[in-house]
Amino acid sequence: MRYDVNFLMRHGEKMTEQAEQLTLTLDFPGMRLDRALAEAHPALSRAQWQKMLREKAVLIDGRPPAKSSAKLRGGEVAVVTIPAVTETELIPEDIPLTVLFEDAHLLVVNKAAGMVVHPAVGNETGTLVNAILHHCPDLEGIGNEKRPGIVHRLDKDTSGAIVVAKNDHALRTLQAQFADRTVEKTYLALVDGYMLPEKAFVDAPIGRDPKHRKKMVVIPRGSSHTAREAQTEYAVTQRYEKHSMVRCHPKTGRTHQIRVHLAYVGFPIVGDRVYGRRKQELLPERHFLHAAELAFAHPVTGEMMRVTAALPPELQAILDQLPLMTAKSA
């Protein structure tokens, strides 16, 4: 089984001697090489590209570059050598899971905030994958490997429903539904302020923030080829004196999409330390974003399923303490 460069750099898998190649055109006149590579392929950080350059894994117009800071003329072709990979050993861990649905083909759990989905550098244990391996000792596995199929992801501090495939067929079928945007995703978010309009459709492309590589940002159409289309529909469901409860339906699945879009329209999510306001009246330990519902077709039977994840106690406790909006305060 082989993974692309995104998976390799994201999860730090062991390498074999077989190799693949990734070809990129660097149309960035005057830009530093390492930054241009990160712009052309933002799934990898600038630091990761610098490491690959040091290891001579990148050729520019057929030759290894002298240094990461080399300035480009524009139009250079980068060829990246990507070793094939095998998975690192995944260890089952006895971590409690809130199971919302399970059969022989798939599992839907209510992921807790603070749990990373897949092992990666800095989060090798305590992940959802480790927990599922313990929960499903008879897991059929993916690609002849005993591991669950991660269909989609949630941020570490986002709680809620996440679906996991137990075999190759389920994984391919569910991934196709996400790619075709036939999966209905519903999120609940508490935002700062009296949100207006009450209902809206946000259609704003998202890309990597050029100044902060770990952040995403709305990018005007046509201004960057790294931006990707992103659409989020939202509706206010409850008003509090200084906050609004919002139900969100993301139509696309971009990184940090709901957090970025709500901040973009002027109503950032409560507790968001990346996209939220500098001074927040409420600052819980995690951002107030919860994947409340998933609706999709069962990968084998085709039956339409709708799975709901209850709001976790720490978020419900915040709502219980907020004063509701009254006619006088409005």
Image (cartoon, rainbow, N blue to C red):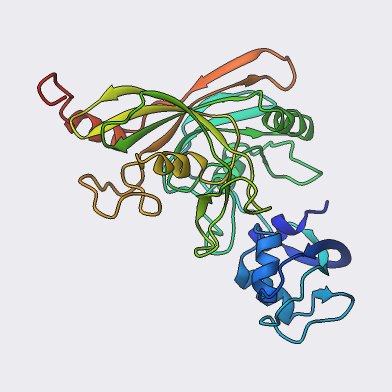
For image coordinates 63% across by 21% down, the residue present is: 296
Q: 58 or 26, which is in the foreground?
A: 26
The answer to which quarter of the image holds residue 6 is bottom right
The answer to which quarter of the image holds residue 315 is top left
Q: 170 or 30, which is in the foreground?
A: 30
Q: Is residue 150 toward the left or the right of residue 244 in the image?
A: right
Q: Position of residue 3 (x, y in %)?
A: 78, 54
Q: Residue furthest bottom?
A: 66
Vertical relation: 274 (above or below) 81? above
- Res 84 seen here: yes
Q: Position of residue 233 (x, y in %)?
A: 49, 27
- Res 235 seen here: no
For image coordinates 87% across by 74% down, the residue present is: 61
Q: Position of residue 111 (x, y in %)?
A: 48, 38
In the picture, which quadrant includes the C terminus?
top left
The answer to which quarter of the image holds residue 179 is top right
Q: Position of residue 251 (x, y in %)?
A: 58, 29
For image coordinates 68% across by 25% down, the residue present is: 104
Q: Is residue 213 toward the left or the right of residue 235 in the image?
A: right
Q: Residue furthest left?
A: 328
For image coordinates 68% across by 36% down, the residue present is: 138
Q: Is residue 124 toward the left or the right of residue 275 in the image?
A: right
